Image (cartoon, grey):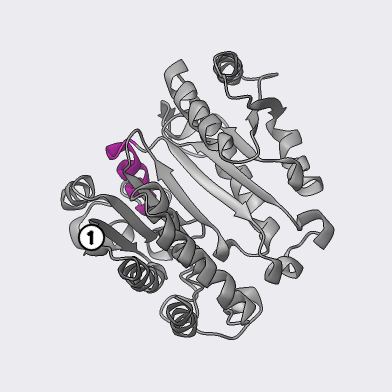
Amino acid sequence: MRANIVVLPGDGIGPEITRVAQNVLRVAAEKFGHTLAFDEQLIGGIAIDQTGTALPEATTAACKGAQAVLLGAVGGPKWDDPKAKVRPEQGLLAIRKALGLYANLRPVKGYAELLDASPLKRELVEGVDLLCVRELTGGLYFGDRQEAGDFGDDARAYDTMVYTGREVRRVVELAFRIALGRRKKVTSVDKANVLASSRLWRAVTVDVQKNDRTGIALEHQLVDSCAMRLVTNPKSFDVIVTENMFGDILSDEAAVLTGSLGMLPSASLGEGTMGLYEPIHGSAPDIAGQGIANPLGTVLSAALLLRHSLSLEEPALAIEAAVSRVLGQKVRTRDLGGQASTADVEKALLSAL
């Protein structure tokens, strides 16, 4: 197979970690007789600096013509002004919308070598293997809003959480399909005791299960109690599906179960095979350019790219095995309690492959 991958390095440590992921992708693909071509494009703060927009038209066009997109991170202190009309995160929202990416997958699986780095007791996190499926194009982040004109007592601002039945159904159906290849259990998270949009969410989810013939077990949980359960009994979850803002918060909470945000990948998917793959951590501007960034979340995102967009399971498994081997060799960056550089981790990964 020959495939074209657009790389969006972005800001901060983004260029450092995507470079490692590209090299690992290339070697893993070639090992199994496949060829990948990479096309770097602008997004985020660097795009604002060079073009005046967080998502240039050239970037969108390139992404639409590729088989998949690998993203580093966006943002940094330079562009942090909340009053700015153009901000780096607008590029993320825009590319998701342009590519029709409606679901974000965040797998959370603890590596045995890192369990002691978790803030929770070892017995709570050992064996955790869950997947957060977050709706990506609806809810508060996309509804009507009004900015406050000032910050006085009479200032008023609002954001509107809106969902349609179609938006809910497609992401819940995706969660059911994914659960079929796992432990066949879906936890739907909402706030149906308070929010009208959550009552729609729950009703549609119930309807999806009624039409399901695969034996998926479904449970409903309110978002606040789900947050508590994630730290008291995380092994009880298989697939969690929820709306945009709840998913944003809960998936970050779930991420720290494994000890480091730097380890966790994500995949944003749409109707076809196109996907956008990125680590869940930010741009870490405080360590950018120092050569100490942890590239493993991005490398594992690259494995998801091979699996979901290119249907290349063998090289995906090879990358995941290489990550496990490197951790076992204790080649670890500072966030994982080691002293290895980004280059050290890259060298170890390529050797393991």
Classify 10 Å Cα crowding around label 1: few (below 14), some (14-19), many (20 and above).
some
Residue 278 in view, yes or no: yes
Picture quarter with the C terminus = bottom left
Q: Which residue is mark 1?
A: 41
**Magenta part, dominant SS:** helix
Q: What SS does tag 1 mark?
A: loop
At horizontal 44% and vertical 79% (from top left) the residue drawn is 346
Residue 199, placed above or below residue 117 = above
Q: For this rendering, which residue is in front, 79 or 200?
A: 200
Q: Which residue is located at x 68 percent, y 64 percent?
A: 259
* Residue 164 picture quarter: top left
Q: x, y percentage for residue 303?
A: 44, 59
In magenta segment, residue 315 = no
For the residue marked with disc 1, what is the amino acid?
Gln
Q: Which residues are magenta?
A: 88-100
Spot occupied by residue 196 in the image (x, y as percentages of width and height) = 59, 15
